[in-house]
Amino acid sequence: MAEQTQAVTLEEENTNPQGSTTPVRAYEDVIAKIRKLINDEEMGPGDALPSERRLSELFTVSRHSVREAIRVLQEQGVLAPRRGSGNYIRSSSREELTRALSSLVSGDSRRLFEVFQLRQLMEPQIAALAAEMILPEQLTEMDQLVRRQMATEDLNELRQIDRNFHALIAKATGNSLLADLMDKISESIDPSRTEGHQSDERRVASISGHCRILSALQAHDPTAAADAMRDHINDIKHAVAPDVA
């Protein structure tokens, strides 16, 4: 089946699985095209996925986008990695695979809505408490994170800096339960930090928001910290998914 897959022409217009001309993110496009291969019976349960390089050539996307799609498919149980031999489609029925892939594409907007709703409910209050409790060394560490964020364009590093910045705010509350909770919630926030949701607009919004939050924390102003965090989350939501309510 791998030889059949290599012969498939996949230079299609970037559309969603329902045929709309609405643009999709690169990694979502990869997921949609893998779904098409399964629907067309070019690949099925137990088959090996072509290499990252081959998929990048077939789908005319970056290897980074392919890697992000593979990571998502692994997390959702569609693909199973095997040490030394790549990724394989799990031994489910073709119908089950199709349903799983459909939910990955169509559920993206709903997932983002829930992520940002969660952030808007929790993080302004966490920032307000942190403004009262934050220690000088924590402010120094946050300042260093923002400086690193300004200096790099590496997506993996930017993603980790963002996660560390928000984790440090929770830690600065002095409430270990809040810090632990934020660490767990960060796993739900991570979908909004993936390569498919990165852009220059998002990077600028993130740096600007972090600077405003840091300034409010340095002033030990709870109201300003909560407002800065609320504005930051709204700005990121607009940059990542302007159509998400």
Image: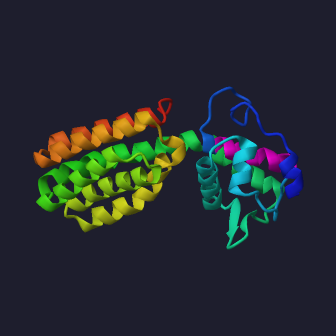
Looking at the figure, which quarter contains the N terminus?
A: bottom right
Can residue 56 be seen here? The reply is yes
Our reading of the magenta stretch's main secondary structure is helix
Q: Would you say residue 41 sits in the magenta stretch?
A: yes
* Residue at image point 68% right, 67% down: 81
Residue 206, picture quadrant: top left
* Residue at image point 75% right, 64% down: 90
Image check: 228 left or right of 41? left
Residue 11, picture quadrant: top right
State the residue lying farthest toward the top: 21
- The answer to whether residue 8 is above or below residue 186 is above
Can residue 233 be seen here? The reply is no
Image check: 30 left or right of 228? right
> What kind of colouring is applied to the model shown?
rainbow
- The answer to whether residue 130 is above or below residue 230 is below
* Residue at image point 68% right, 45% down: 30
Residue closest to the eye, 139 or 191: 139
Q: Would you say residue 149 sits in the magenta stretch?
A: no
Q: Tell me the magenta residue range.
A: 28-42
Give the percent coordinates (x, y) of residue 164. 33, 57
Image check: 16 left or right of 146? right
Give the percent coordinates (x, y) of residue 152. 37, 47
- The answer to whether residue 147 is above or below residue 200 is below
Residue closest to the eye, 110 or 61: 61
* Residue at image point 64% right, 48% down: 104
